[in-house]
Amino acid sequence: MTTQELPFPGLAGVPTADGPQNRKEYTSDQEVRWCPGCGDYAVLAAVQGFLPELGLRRENIVFVSGIGCSSRFPYYLDTFGIHSIHGRAPAIATGIATAREDLSVWVVTGDGDALSIGGNHLIHAMRRNVNLKILLFNNRIYGLTKGQYSPTSEPGKITKSTPLGSVDHPFNPVSLALGAEATFVARTIDSDRKHLTSVLSAAAAHRGTALVEIYQNCPIFNDGAFDAVKDNDTKVDAIIPLVHGEPIRFGAPGEDGLGSKGIVRSASGGVEVAQVAEVGTDALVVHDAHNADPSTAFALSRLTDAGVLHQSPIGIFRDVDRPTYDDQARQQIAQAGQDQGDPQVALAGLISGSDTWTIV
Amino acid sequence: MAKQVQQLDRVIIRFAGDSGDGMQLTGDRFTQESAAFGNDLATFPNFPAEIRAPQGTLPGVSSFQVHFADHDILTAGDAPDVLVAMNPAALKANLADMVPGTAIIVDSHDFSGRNLAKAGYESNPLDDDGPGSLAATYNLSVLDLTGMTVEAVKEFGLSRKDAARAKNMFALGLLSWMYGRPTETTIDFLTARFAKAPDIRDANITAFKAGWNFGETTEAFVVQYEIKPAAMPVGTYRNISGNLALAYGLVAGGVQTGLPVFLGSYPITPASDILHELSKHKRFGVTTFQAEDEIAGIGAALGASFAGALGITTTSGPGIALKSETIGLAVMTELPLVIIDVQRGGPSTGLPTKTEQADLLQAMFGRNGEAPVPIVAPQSPGDCFSAALEAVRIAVTYRTPVMLLSDGYLANGSEPWRIPEISELPTVDPAFATGPNKVSVADDGTETHTFWPYLRDEETLARPWAIPGTPGIEHRIGGLEKGDGHGNISYDPANHDYMVRIRQAKVDRIAESLPPLEVDDPSGRARVLVLGWGSTYGPIGAACRRVRKDGLDVAQVHLRHLNPFPKDLGEILKRYDAVMIPEMNLGQLSLLIRAKYLVDVVGYNQVNGMPLKAAELAEAITDLIAHTGPVPTTDATGEMEAVK
Ligand code: SF4
């Protein structure tokens, strides 16, 4: 099984199952209630298929969500779960992950939940590097409240609350996560089961906060928002695949059979798209997800359109090691408690202090 | 020279100076000396919200009042017998509290031009000796404490500024001599505190001793006072502040439940000291998480509770406002959670360093929907320890968030505390769910064993505490309404009505576990009952004593539990013709009592950021007794006649 073959530091301390598991064991008895065609179904299917591969004890997995369509996710998985309140899932999950080393803790959130009402908790979880896996379902719209623009909607978007078009500037979730110094940042697509699963697997392996942005189609209120990266006709020019150790190339195949377009350093200090035939392969940026300096990852994140999506890097932007908050907090306690002895005796000593007097 | 020794039964001293003069430390040391001596005592620190308010000004004045006695006392006292004023502003700011004839000791050093002006004096009040002057009104001692300090410590070669800083220790030494305090604890304290700065250490100890010796030799003071140790119940005592006792109570809550403590908190006055204190006790398995905001503090604590820890959050009123939604989630998910509100003056930012009891209704009702939360309140600094343990007991037994309402007066005030034996403390078994709890039998007789997270204990109505890592009880909970028993989402109208009622019934059920109220009605003839809660216990008790000393009858009941009320409260209220409720708010407990028991209570309300004054309250009680009339009694013929 996967856990025996791969080093998964992200899951160290979580007990493994006695035997093989299947997706049925991870499926709860609750009826799934998303709209027909919703991208959430695909992600749920991918997760239900992927969790048995981790080989963990099911009772040691916890899914925590906030509020929104995607936040119903925990109800459909037969693990432990909390469907909490709007925006607060990372805070609640921080408590769970810090209190218990033996749990694999996942957060399911949306663009409104994570980036609007819960923005503060999200950035602080990432800077602390709590051992959490955060799945951010980005459909660039408010679905559950029936179609208002979200903090990732493109400028000018016409919605129920912006009849003349939105004048808000959107967040780029990957840029935000990198700015908050997240140690693992990735982007994937709901409909690409294989890529989604590989990213989830890498996130699970990572020890620390993993932020995975999932482009998720909402056919009811924002249909087609990600068509560019999904349609067979357009995706070759829209998806900029990030593969660690490989030059970043995309677009229709050139003479060498690889993408005719590539990413090069720009004069302004960032990165830009160039024709490989013009710049040569040596000029291409070789993706290094393990680079301690997040500058190039950030530059890459800026290749995503802020407006209507035509082009976006997909893959793992950053995957670096940094001590986690929860490991360090537990370590301090373990060290302090080494020669504790009987807690009641220690308590008696504590409350007495040193300045006492006795009345007989 | 030989000094006279005069016996006193109690003394109230107020040390006042600039925020930078070390008055809190001075008061604290005097308190420790008095505690070591065996007096009963109560303290009241009073300081500005600013860390360094402008020097020498009225807003920058910091004071520490200590009341010590040879008998048991209940408050830090209304008005000082002795004021020690280290500068003009300290004198001016505190003069209004001084009764003519009481003693004022002034450091005259700063009574000159600019410093007088900063305090708003046009001329030096110490120079005036006409009628109505300080000298004519008070027992005034004008001493150059700073000058004497600088002279005493000159051998250490400190800068003038550093040398002058030891003046608080000179003052402490003088007062310690005057009241016959033991000096060892202070010398030990200074030795440890300044271990890394030998010059400063020696200067402070020298100044302290110089102050003592000055008292011994000067002709300015001819009387030394003696306040005998108080006769207190047998036991081992220490001095303790409310925040420290609360922190210890929470550590004890972890030990006595066998649960790891998880504190999620965001710094806020006057609750931060609990966070600081708990951060020191990692060896007890206490995790402290300083969150990004109040909401994350309680969120993480609730997450930790879900994971099987004793989740705690500490804050003050503004923080409770931010935590409200998560408290609602804790009500809905029925998880144990202890929420500490150290109340301060409100609304909004209000008066961060002053005390108030105006969060009772917030604690009671400050959430959307029907969201009942049990409320407990400590009544004195030392009592914060037991109140914390009681909050833990209720939270764990009933799987519910519990609000503990302390306040600024309790938090920073201190008193001698009889240290309990650990064997006296209650233990609570968290009784985690261990496996499926529901058997369903199909038509063909086959049994399935499942886990129902909302199947209730018949006695407590509590649901199982089902923590991750336990096989066979995987389940999902959340803020959406639960179906009775199985806990899955339910929008069924009848189910919602039932669940709202059962959550309320569970909280009401706590009353079954409460001991009968203690009614303090020594003569048994009182017609007026004074009902209180929280930190007003001391002033109410002291006021009742005054009233009884005057030969009148009054009864006192103090509530530890504000929600639910104890079962016998209604019956007790009905025994009295009049009920007065003194509170540091506009009548919040009054409102609850009127609503629940239809008793026309009389409010006594003060919201000035300060504790109630016993003398004023005693007057109000006396008025109410007069208004209510004497005690009717039944004579042999069965007719009513008035006593007295
Ligand atoms: S509204 Fe959109 S996001 Fe929500 S369930 Fe329906 S399709 Fe999915």
Image (tube, rainbow, N blue to C red):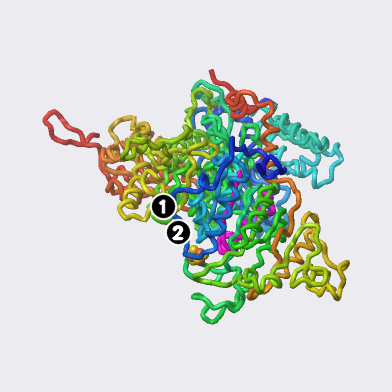
Give the extent of the magenta segment: A104-130
Residue A237 x %, y %: 71, 73
Q: Is residue A60 magenta?
A: no
Q: Residue at x 58, y 37 (%)?
A: A19
Q: Residue furthest bottom?
A: A164
Q: Which of the image's four quarters has the N terminus of chain B?
A: top right
| Residue A88: quadrant of the picture | bottom right
Q: Which residue is mark 2?
A: A33
| Residue neighbourhood size for the residue with mark 2, other residues' Cα within 10 Å, grouped as few (<14), some (14–19), many (≥20) | few
The spot of residue A223 in percent (x, y) is: 54, 72
Chain at tag 2: A
Front in this rendered view, residue B105 or A119: A119
Instruction: Decide if ligand 1 comes within 8 Å of the CB at mark 2.
Output: yes
Do residues under tags 2 and 1 come within 8 Å of each other at their CB atoms? no
Chain of residue at mark 1: B
Quarter of the C terminus of chain B within the rendering: top left
Hey, what amino acid is under mark 2?
Arg
Which residue bears the numbered disc 1? B489
Q: Label 1 is placed on what type of residue?
A: Ile
Magenta-drawn stretch contains A109: yes
**Which type of secondary structure does the marked residue at label 1 adopt?**
loop
The reply to whether residue B378 is visible in this rendering is no
Q: Residue at x 73, y 59 (%)?
A: A317
| Residue B262 horizontal/vertical position (percent) | 58, 40
Q: Is mark 1 within 8 Å of ligand 1?
A: no
Q: Report the label total.
A: 2
What predominant SS class does the magenta segment belong to?
helix
Q: Residues within 10 Å of mark 1 (few under 14, many from 20)?
A: some
